[in-house]
Amino acid sequence: MERLTEARTIAIGMGGTITNNDVGFIVCFAASQTAEQFVMLIEEYEEITAEQQQRCVIVVTVNSLM
């Protein structure tokens, strides 16, 4: 859960707009390049996974997928 909180903080710092859900969040940025940079920044976090869809990124905890 700590990594999820860190990812939220990074996304907000990059100017993202957050929509929270039970297992993660969706963040949308002004440009798809920013979304791509965000995914690259958090890809080393083992506890969460992220998928980019245009200028938004869906971030969820890995254990929620099992």
Image (cartoon, helix red, strand yellow):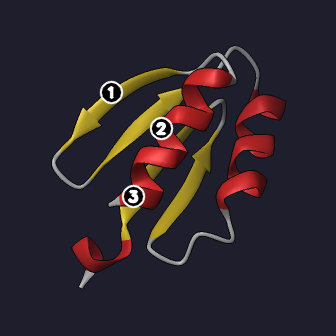
Instruction: Please name the residue that numbered disc 3 is placed on.
Output: 2
Q: Outermost residue toward the bottom?
A: 66
**Disc 2/disc 1 C-alpha distance (Å):** 10 Å
Q: Name the mark nearer the viewer: 3 or 1.
A: 3
How many numbered marks are there?
3
Secondary structure, mark 2, is: helix
Mark 3 or mark 1, earlier in chain:
3
Q: For the point 51% across and 47% down, which residue is it?
A: 6
> Is 43 left, or right, of 4 in this rendering?
right
Mark 2 or mark 1, earlier in chain:
2
**Disc 3/disc 1 C-alpha distance (Å):** 18 Å
Q: Quadrant of residue 55?
A: top right
**Disc 2/disc 3 C-alpha distance (Å):** 10 Å
Name the image quarter holding the C terminus: bottom left
Mark drawn on residue 19: 1
Residue 18 or residue 31, whichever sits in front: 18
Residue 6 or residue 31, whichever sits in front: 6
